[in-house]
Amino acid sequence: MTYIAIIITYIFIQNYILVNFLGLCPFIGVSKNSESAIGMGLAVTFVTGVTSVICWLIYTLLLVPLHLEYLETVAFILVIASLVQALEMFIRKTSPSLYKALGIYLPLITTNCLVLGIAIINIQEKHNIFETFVTGVSAGLGFTLAIVLMSAIREKLDIESVPKAFKGTPIAFICASLMALSFMGFDKGILANLHLV
Amino acid sequence: MTKYLKSSLTLFCICAFFALLLSLVNMVTEPRIKALAEQRVLDSLSMVIPSNSRINMDKGEVTVNKDGVNSYYIVENADKSLKGYVLNLKGSGYGGEFTVLAYYSKDGKLEKSKLLDNSETSGIGKKYENDDAISLFASYDRIPTSKKDLDPSDSLIVSGASVTFQGLSSALIGGQNYINSVLKGGLK
Amino acid sequence: MNKKINSAYLQEASKGLFKENPVFVLMLGLCPTLSMSAQVDNALGMGIAVTFVLVCSNIIISLLRSLIKNSIRIPAFIVIIASFVTIVELVVKAYIPSLSVLGVYLPLITVNCIILGRAEAFASKNSVLASALDGLGMGIGFTLSMLLLSLIREIIGSGSISLPFAKISIPVLSTHPVRVLSLAPGAMLVMGLLLALFNVIKDQKKTRKEAKV
């Protein structure tokens, strides 16, 4: 696949939240207003981009030569947890404004399925290092797109009269369901029609 | 300082203990996982080879990774003389990449093929997982390159899904060329 | 005295079923819940895998709770959980290959918030037996919620119920299934409707209680 095909695939066709439910907890939890949604989205994009490359390096340069492939999950989650921690400290030192925008979301990202999921999927799909990076960033952008759209919908919902039983999360799930339905329209045929495969 | 040292030592001990535990579990499960994977390959191979022949498992899978050919297996008659090859071919279709297993006789005639894992959208590209559709390719003397080469009754079976048809056709022809130009009825 | 302790433990185990149900009340671990609930047998497999990891990690964390200092708490918990997840993964690959459809969601049990959440909130503060029961109760609550979701989705979405050793097909629905329920949007739709239903039930209970008072 070309890089453009990867980007289109992971942002639209196989949006990880709306098709595979990876990262659903923050998607429902942090989408109440668009400001925090954008912050969360960008923080996730940043982390998936960096961690997927580092996890790939650890897997190919360390685990495979030592025949320790079975330590994949343990190694990846440790890398992600410590990297997120390090990133938080680094951003706090270097750029207080960025820290103000992303800081509070960073600790939440360790347990975001998307980050570990992308790292594992990159290995399963036998991506090379550049494809890994592009996949990580575009999966993060797909997450950002979905969560920002969702927050816009929920801000509108706040001023609508929703039946009492549906208030809060139930209606959020139903909106997400409709969004997923419309994202099903992005078919793999797009890639063939654009001559990308 | 000793406080940090102590807690990092605890963490290290926990990591070491669990790494050891995992290696033990892995020692038990690894041979079984390998055997299951081999069994899966053999099962799919036996679907494409003729009934009175067998795969030469001493040679096993020969990796190629060139011209769309991933690897091949050697197929022998009961008396161990060469009968043909099973090629593991890579191609691209409507929804991405797919893998085809194809059996060719030693002079390069395509006899049977089967689609393995693929990411085709259901209904369109998936047609070829059905044996009727993919066995079409083997029923012609020359592998059809486009739907115009097909009998009208056959083109009904594969209506739609042109991209996949072309992808399959070029993968299968690539395999034939590989046998005729590189293997030439012998071993590389 | 003894009876009192018993009932306390019973409460530990049963709170995960309804009052603190991990899926519908705490809303943790949603990603495997929704993705693996298109078929009953997969949902059951996922539920059992999560329960196993939950019980084991709760026991170990509770055993080590005095050793693990606050500063290394999170990495230590994560390593313990990830190790049990890897054990489950290897065992499934070797002995239950039919469950390999769980694919990437099996290693993702590691970041399932239920498990880390219970380790943080319960196992790191309570005795071994209580933690084990808490894990078991939460795991069963998770499994039951997955079963409920998957039954609805599979019966309407595919017109069948796939059990580990048999597949029951339902007349009429199996020829005219509402396909969308077995796809991703259907999962979210059913989840939203069920949450609303539970809200209604909770409200009714509350008003009845208030009427009594």
Image: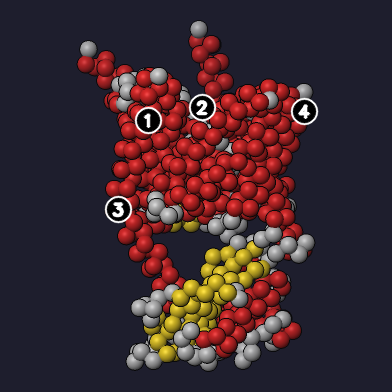
Answer whether labels 1 and 4 touch (C-beta < 8 Å). no
The residue at the point 40 percent across, 73 percent down is B42
Q: Visible in this render: residue C111?
A: yes
Relative vertical location of residue C176 with respect to residue C11 in this rendering, above or below: below
Describe residue C76's horizontal placement relative to residue A57 as left or right.
left
Around disc 4, counting alpha carbons within 10 Å, would you say few (fewer than 14), some (14 to 19), or many (20 or more)? few
Could you tell me which secondary element the residue under label 2 belongs to? loop
Q: Chain of mark 2?
A: C
Of badges 2 and 3, the one in the foreground is: 3
The residue at the point 32 percent across, 60 percent down is B31
The numbered mark at residue B11 is 1
Answer whether labels 1 and 2 touch (C-beta < 8 Å). no
The residue at the point 51 percent across, 13 percent down is C209
Figure colour scheme: secondary structure
Answer whether labels 4 and 2 touch (C-beta < 8 Å). no
**Horizontal and vertical percent for residue C111?**
49, 37
Residue at numbered disc 2: C26
Residue at numbered disc 4: A156
- Same chain for mark 4 and mark 2? The answer is no
Q: CA distance from mark 4 to mark 2?
A: 25 Å
Relative vertical location of residue A90 with respect to residue B20 in this rendering, above or below: above
Could you tell me which secondary element the residue under label 1 belongs to? helix
Of badges 4 and 3, the one in the foreground is: 3
